[in-house]
Structures are given as C-alpha cells and as structure tokens.
Amino acid sequence: MNFKKVDLSFQSCNSEYSVSDVILFSAPLDTTTSYRPGTRFGPNAIRVESIGIEWYSPYKNMDLKDYQTADIGDLELPMGDVKKSLDIIYQTTKKILKDNKLPMMVGGEHLVTYPQVLALSEKYPDLKIIHLDAHTDLRDEFLGMKLSHATVIKRCYDILGDNRIYQFGIRSGEKSEFEFSKQGHTYMEKYTINTLENIINEIKMSPVYITIDLDILDPSIFPGTGTPEPGGITYKELLKAMKAFEKLENIVGADIVELAPKIDSTDVSTAVAAKTLREMILLLQK
C-alpha cells in the first residue's frame, strides 16, 4: 500500500508521506446514515474551505506550515459495501501505525471510527477513547444492522471492554443505552464536558484515541450535520476541550466526523470543521 500526494490538500498539509509525522486522510463513508445523508462530501468540502482558515493557531501558538503533515486524500470506498469500506480504513490505519506515524481521520459518518480503533487496539492493548458527541452510539444494532453510525461506540466497547471509553456532551439516545453506561460500562457525562479535565488527568499516561462527532456542538453553531440535536456545547467550550487534550501524554490518533456540508448552504459548518481539523492536527504534532 503506497500513498501519493493529492491534488487538493488541507491547507499546508502537502508534505511527502515518508517525512511526515501526522497522516491526514478521509473516509467518505455515508452508507448507514439514518436521517439526513451527505457526510461523504464533508472531507473535501473541508479541504476547499480551508483556504479561508489561517494556518496559524493563536490558541496553540503553532503554525501548520512548520510541521510535516501528509494529506493522502479520500480513501476509495466501494459504495454500499460497508464491510469492505471498513476493511480499507482498517488496512490504511495499520499501514500508518506500522510506519510509526499518527493517523488523523476525517469522516464521513461516525462508523468510520470503528476500524481505526480496531487497528489501534492491536498496537495499544490498553487503548482508551475520549468520545465527544451528542449521541450515545451504544445501540447493539440499529435497523437490524450491527455496523451503523448508531452502534459505533458499542462496537468499540466490544473491542475494549469496561472502563476504557469516556463520553461527553451526550444528550440523545435510547433509554437502554444510557442504562448500559450507568452499569459501569462507559463513563458518560450527559449534556456537558465539565469533567473532561478530571478524566484527562486520570488517563493522561495511557494511549488515547480522540473521536469528535461535530454534532456535539449546538446546531445553532453547527447545523450542517445529519442528526442535529439542540442543547449542544459552544465552540469556545470545544476549544477548551482541545486545550485540555494537550495534557495527554500519548495521543495515538484522532478523528472528526459527521459534517454534511450541503445541509448548510452558508458553509459556516464547514468552516467550523476546518478550524477544528487545524487544531486537531496541531494537537497531534505537539
């Protein structure tokens, strides 16, 4: 598996793969979306919109152009074939990890997190997940499917087990999903992210994967998503979370998911996603 430069890259992330520390790639899977589709268009919309986002982050006092990051573009995922698509994501992540680089994935629907976590768990048996989202994603199946954007965290739980997944901002899901968490299977802070720093202090020496479903943001800030859920956090709160992530000593990968750009004709949601991606790449570069 060889990765080549793409014609359209995110900002200055056009370094050669061989010399890059962080590998940006996108997984435009949009097959199990249950309400409003369109996440397959998210990654390249972010690349286009990034022309309006500064490379320099005043929050981190870091500039993307000062770091080696390769954007290898969209993975070619076969339309309608969920298992094959997930295997392509898994094999891509395995290759990146084998080369001792950090994967930064952009979705696509949230199901794309599952194969990346599977690959990471094989390299890091004590892997932990920080999950920012409006939704529990803890169903065992949804509409008869085990593999769904509504089951993704349950599939990750099946890999990792108890006391390894930390969920924040959750405000939507079936009663059974909340009860599953209450039984001690996951840590869940409903509605807010107030305890995030406490959890980070507890797990900061562990290998940690960060998955951010952008619908954790209130839809007044981020309307361009398939399943908007009122009552979300502000962007300043998300920035505060990303600042807290800097305390983690061993971030081994990350993703942002669930931008559906065509739903928001103003492109504000895409700009929000692009700025978030900049901050997450710089986080992995620290």
Image (cartoon, grey):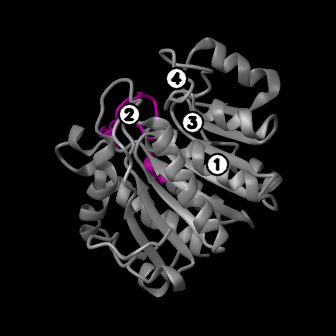
Crowd band around label 1 with a 10 angstrom C-alpha radius: few (<14), some (14–19), many (20+): many
Tag 3: residue type?
Answer: Gly
Q: In this view, does 76 lie above or below 219?
A: below
Q: Which of marks 4 and 1 is nearer the N terminus?
A: 1
Q: Nearer the viewer, residue 260 or 59?
A: 260
Q: Is residue 130 above or below residue 157?
A: below
Q: Give the range drawn in magenta.
A: 217-237
Q: Which of marks 1 and 3 is nearer the N terminus?
A: 1
- Camera-nearest label, 2 or 3: 2
Q: Is residue 62 visible?
A: no
- Camera-nearest label, 1 or 3: 1
Look at the numbered disc 4 and give the secondary structure of its residue. Answer: loop
Contact between marks 2 and 1 (CB within 8 A): the answer is no
Magenta highlight on residue 142: no
Label 4 to label 1: alpha-carbon separation: 23 Å
Contact between marks 2 and 3 (CB within 8 A): the answer is no
Q: Which of marks 2 and 1 is nearer the N terminus?
A: 2
Residue at the spot x=60%, y=21% of the render?
Answer: 139
Crowd band around label 3 with a 10 angstrom C-alpha radius: few (<14), some (14–19), many (20+): many
Disc 3 target residue: 169
Tag 1: residue type?
Answer: Val
Contact between marks 4 and 2 (CB within 8 A): the answer is no
Tag 2: residue type?
Answer: Thr
Contact between marks 4 and 1 (CB within 8 A): the answer is no
Disc 4 target residue: 172
Residue 31: give its label: 2
Q: Nearer the viewer, residue 12 or 16?
A: 16
Q: In this view, does 80 lie to the left or right of 169?
A: left
Q: In this view, does 17 lie above or below 112?
A: below
